[in-house]
Image (cartoon, rainbow, N blue to C red):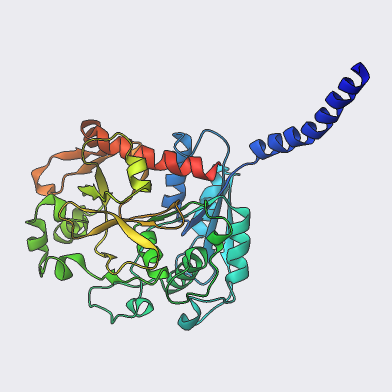
Amino acid sequence: MKNIKLLNIIVVLLILTPLYSRADKASDRVPVLIMCRPTVGQIKNIEVLKSEGLLGNGKLKLLCVYHKNELTDYAPSRNYVKVKGLGWVSFVKIKGSIRKAEIFKKNIWTSQFREIFDISDGIIFTGGMDIPPDIYRQNSSLLSVATTPYRTLYESSFLFHLIGGNQNEKFHPFLEDKPEYPILGICLGSQTMNIAAGGTLVQDIPSEIYKLKYVEQVLKQSKENIHSSRYMKALFPESSKDIAPVFHGIKVNRASILLKKIMGNINSIPSVLSSHHQSAKIIGKDLFIAATSMDGRIVEAIEHKKFKNVLGVQFHPEYRYLYRGLRFVTNHPISGNFFSIKNFLAKNVASLKFHKNLWKWFAVQIRR
């Protein structure tokens, strides 16, 4: 009997040993985060988030993705990574060209997108210039500034491959195979997410939503209705580099699951850093509005109904000076007063907590 019990113990140990070994190897795996449009500034943002522990306390690999025909020169980014010795950062170029009619279907980029998706644990689509309106079936407003065509094409197609859209209902999106995969769209990234799913955009908020024609009219509004510092910079171009960013509150939709989870026990309204003149209009397939501006007229966040870790935010939680304060001129340079993000957030504890909670959520997902 003793021999039988001993044999059973040995068999169990033989079965469990490789399982524990695989678990140890899985726990040692370094998460791979994808970031599109890897400018020096964006890489610095990830550096700060990583050093502040907001992307988790373990190791991380950052894979910077861009199209080889983009007008943006990424040589400074590569040089910055080399000089700083950032061995955890690498680059990959999307190659080949497509026609706009091929954005929302399998194309020459499909296999490249799939390879990136398969080796990664999450992706961030960052901010930038406007999307050409013909991609979302609209004529171009005189106020649309679409100056990054290749970036728009490949990121719109990439997001379509990830989540699908009503332009091609039969397409099998990648997240069907890995539904917990986290996607964070920031500013333009959120707009691109909506376009990829078949939605449209407000091409200019002041003129379309608030029926305003002049910069001075925009600046006379409540601060809750001003969504960018570009208007103050237009009046004071000589001070444009020092003008403070714009902050305003957001109102979270009761139907939100993800954003409410990020909010946690935050009882007051968080203020977010805003820098945009466009926003989502008609919402794309399987997306819904998760937050709006305080007046309810501007979409500030979108979530996916099916893929629970897909979030688009119209504001900028990635900006490194949210976590390492910097002094700016106030929104009216003539006044001579100064604005500190650090001091602002110290007085608005809910805002800082909200931004940190957002990254804690994202860090958990990429390290699952």
- Vertical relation: 252 (above or below) 280: above
Measuring from the top left, give residue 358's x and y in whole percent. 38, 42
- Vertical relation: 149 (above or below) 248: below
Residue 317 is at least partly visible in this image = no
- Vertical relation: 101 (above or below) 278: below
Q: Give whichever of 113, 267 is nearer the camera.
A: 267
Would residue 111 appear left or right of 224 to someone viewing this image? right
Residue 281 is at least partly visible in this image = yes
View extreme (top): residue: 2
Dividing the image into 4 quarters, which one contains the C terminus?
top right
Q: How many labels does the image show?
A: 0
Measuring from the top left, give residue 270's x and y in whole percent. 24, 41
View extreme (front): residue: 1
* Quadrant hosting residue 1: top right
Measuring from the top left, give residue 156's x and y in whole percent. 45, 69
Q: Give whichever of 91, 362 is nearer the camera.
A: 362
Q: Which residue is drawn at 60% across and 64% down?
A: 114
Would residue 331 appear left or right of 349 to someone viewing this image? left
Q: Which residue is drawn at 12% across and 65% down?
A: 210
